[in-house]
Image (cartoon, rainbow, N blue to C red):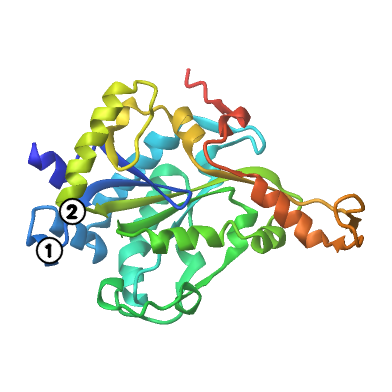
Amino acid sequence: MEKKYNFYDKNLIGHIEIKNLDCFYFTRYYPTSKYGYNENQEFIFNFKDGTCPEIYAQIFSRAILNLFKGLINTETNKVILEDTIILPVPASTQEKHKMRYQDLFKLISEKTGVGNGYEYIKIKNDVEAKHLNNNRTSLDEHIEIDYSFMKNYTNIILIDDVITTGKSISELASKFRNIEILQKYVPNSEMKRFIVGMTLAKTFSHLDLISDELGNEKIVSDPNSTFKSNSFNNFFKLDPIDIIKGIDTFFYTSFEITDIKFKDEVSDGSIISKEYIKEYYYLISHNKFSILNEQLTVVNEN
């Protein structure tokens, strides 16, 4: 029973929502500083060091194909994976970033058909690893992002080693939902998009383990649930369309509009700018559990 929780099982996937970002993970990580050595830590450390990228590429590729295979975006007439790009959550140094992601991303792209976004995020300044540095460097100081990929790809999968608080991955995700970035790189877009996180592991404590057991009891009692936060699920029980329905999507529309006077609402007849109109529309169009598959169809495999 314990082995299931401490090590990777190819048939199981974990899910947690962090700040409107759906994150999937494959095993649990118990920090050595608190719990000593356990069998899956070498599995995590080898990934961080870029050891045997073929093994980890297989793990991530299997998950991507299981979650998103067989779907077509009818707006672009592309298989959804061809509309999707993988991007790295930055490591602390340029050397570690290259070791961890360069070969891995090439292999994942070859196995799944998703775009390889390794070159679009670069390390500007090396920093100490987060667990060694309480004075955390801001993301803007640490990395440089080339947003030009947004012209060719609709959806994003952010890949990381371990998720603990989720601050880094959610902060990076917010960069790609930024209204100014979208206006610059995808003008006149009326396309629904999604961003998800995918990490090798999630940091756990023994209290989390107890909580997760309770969560699994809820899954049994709720047959209509696709997944529950903080829980592991069987890959083969997950329907890609149901997954897509649950993933947080955002919908941006760029449109021309002249300045407007709110005669009835603002007594002094003050004017609201174009930029404010656009940003307001973007915010109200960012919905959790929106039905993305209204514009998706299932590939006929016969």
- Looking at the rendered structure, the kind of residue marked 2 is Ser
- Looking at the rendered structure, the kind of residue marked 1 is Lys
| Mark 2 secondary-structure assignment | loop
Q: Measuring 25% from the left and 64% from the top, which residue is drawn there?
A: 48
**Tag shown at residue 205:** 2
Q: Position of residue 146 (x, y in %)?
A: 57, 68
Q: Quadrant of residue 183?
A: bottom right
120 left or right of 125?
right
25 w.r.t. 149: above or below: above
Q: Within 10 Å of the Cα at label 1, are there few (<14), some (14-19), or many (20+) other Cα atoms?
A: few
Residue that numbered label 1 is attached to? 34
Q: Position of residue 259 (x, y in %)?
A: 89, 59
| Mark 1 secondary-structure assignment | helix
Q: Measuring 46% from the left and 28% from the top, which residue is drawn there?
A: 242
Res. 148 in view: yes
Res. 8 in view: no
